[in-house]
Image (cartoon, grey):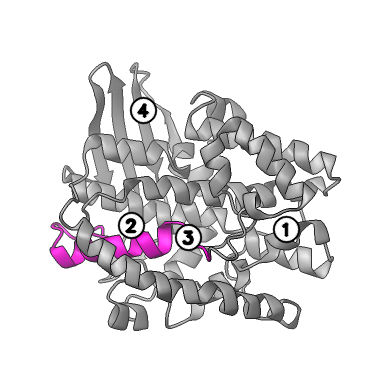
């Protein structure tokens, strides 16, 4: 039976039934972005002395330890130890009139480690590792990661409209956060907006194209089979996601939560948090956020670091973090215990809702 939760990231208007969530967000979460900006600015200046350009290991490691892992498949020609990632239809646009239409990557794992064999973007072969990593990062953060946000707005409205008290904490922040990202002049997705003008950093993606790409599921075709997820191994990022979904399913059954909410909750609670945690592991790489920049200047490296610290790294109010670990309610504590059995560190970063 189809789930009643619809995947729409742009369903984020401040309707009367969710006004209280906007007030809560502006009181508890919004100030953290400005407070953390001071830390981000100084820390980014510090990181400039230690940043290193991306290597083959970084590029492949990023793909294998974020939701991009869902796109990995064995090489079509069957060569042992070789893998491919292919995106054939992308709608993303970057500032300056650039369009990311497609990309493909092939790499090899062997006794000598990881080696990138080829990478093409829009049909053009590339070798610049900085541009390659930037392209993968651009696609992942604005397309694939965004898909973990898709169910959140509708799920929150379902929780509020149906007074699902057991999931109350899963209603926090998500809708107002999406509204600010998609409609506010303070959005980091507004390249020429107030954030880039006054706070000194901003993303390269045109946000209208992000919304368009969020509806594009073509890249996922043929990659949702459980056998493919299992093939990565139970302790891989993909394996942990699969085991986490099974754990969530069991906890939902014990607490008599509507099984139709499984996939929305899985994305909203687990996939989103773990993907952010995976992204944050590459904080010391020097690259430009704009995939078409051929070099990475000091300012571009600083901008990238600011974006990572404020947008892709967990950014929570320590007084109200909304991690499942911090919520003293049976459902969330039960889920936390089950996730700890899979990976204690992973369980600690999971939030009850899309908080950042």
Kindly identify the residue that appears in the image at 27 percent across and 62 percent down: 43
Kindly identify the residue that appears in the image at 62 percent across and 31 percent down: 341
Q: Which residue is mark 3?
A: 213
Residue 83 — which label? Answer: 4
Real-space Cα separation, disc 1 to disc 2, in angstroms: 29 Å
N-term-proximal mark, 4 vs 2: 4
In this rendered view, identify the residue nearer to me: 149 or 244. 244
Please state the horizontal and vertical placement of residue 316, each as a whole percent of the image. 51, 63
**Residue 262 as seen in the image, left or right of residue 354:** right
Q: Quadrant of residue 309?
A: bottom left
Magenta highlight range: 288-317
Q: Which residue is mark 2?
A: 100
Q: Report whether residue 292 is seen.
A: no
Secondary structure, mark 1, is loop
Instruction: Tell me if residue 231 comes above or below residue 255 in the rendering.
Output: above
Real-space Cα separation, disc 3 to disc 1, in angstroms: 19 Å
Real-space Cα separation, disc 3 to disc 4, in angstroms: 25 Å
**Residue 165 as seen in the image, left or right of residue 18:** right
N-term-proximal mark, 3 vs 4: 4
Real-space Cα separation, disc 3 to disc 2, in angstroms: 11 Å
N-term-proximal mark, 1 vs 2: 1
**Residue 269 as seen in the image, left or right of residue 105:** right
Kindly identify the residue that appears in the image at 76 percent across and 36 percent down: 250
In this rendered view, identify the residue nearer to me: 177 or 45. 45
> Does residue 315 show up magenta in the picture?
yes
Kindly identify the residue that appears in the image at 57 percent across and 58 percent down: 149
């Amino acid at each position: 039976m189809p789930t009643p939760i619809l995947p729409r990231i742009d369903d984020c208007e401040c309707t009367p039934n969710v006004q209280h969530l906007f007030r809560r967000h502006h009181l508890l979460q919004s100030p953290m972005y400005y407070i953390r900006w001071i830390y981000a600015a100084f820390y980014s200046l510090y990181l400039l002395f230690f940043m290193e350009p991306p290597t083959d290991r970084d590029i492949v490691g990023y793909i294998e330890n974020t939701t991009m892992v869902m796109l990995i498949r064995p090489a079509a020609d069957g060569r042992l130890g070789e893998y491919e990632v292919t995106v054939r239809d992308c709608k993303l646009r970057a500032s300056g009139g650039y369009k990311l239409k497609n990309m493909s990557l092939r790499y090899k794992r062997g006794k000598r480690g990881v080696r990138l064999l080829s990478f093409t973007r829009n049909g053009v072969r590339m070798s610049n590792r900085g541009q390659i990593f930037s392209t993968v990062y651009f696609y992942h953060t604005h397309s694939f990661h965004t898909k973990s946000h898709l169910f959140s707005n509708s799920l929150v409205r379902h929780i509020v409209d149906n007074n699902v008290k057991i999931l109350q904490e899963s209603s926090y922040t998500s809708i107002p956060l999406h509204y600010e990202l998609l409609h506010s002049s303070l959005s980091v997705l507004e390249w020429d907006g107030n954030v880039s003008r006054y706070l000194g950093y901003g993303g390269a993606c045109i946000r209208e194209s992000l919304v368009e790409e969020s509806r594009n599921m073509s890249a996922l075709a043929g990659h949702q089979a459980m056998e493919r997820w299992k093939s990565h191994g139970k302790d891989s990022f993909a394996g942990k996601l699969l085991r986490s979904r099974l754990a969530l399913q069991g906890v939902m059954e014990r607490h008599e939560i509507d099984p139709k909410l499984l996939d929305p909750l899985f994305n909203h609670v687990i996939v989103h948090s773990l993907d952010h945690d995976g992204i944050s592991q590459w904080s010391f790489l020097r690259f430009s956020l704009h995939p078409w920049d051929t070099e990475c200047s000091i300012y571009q490296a600083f901008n990238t670091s600011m974006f990572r610290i404020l947008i892709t790294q967990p950014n929570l109010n320590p007084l109200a973090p909304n991690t499942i670990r911090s919520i003293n309610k049976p459902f969330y504590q039960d889920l936390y215990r089950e996730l700890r059995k899979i990976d204690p560190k992973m369980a600690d970063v999971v939030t009850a809702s899309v908080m950042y």
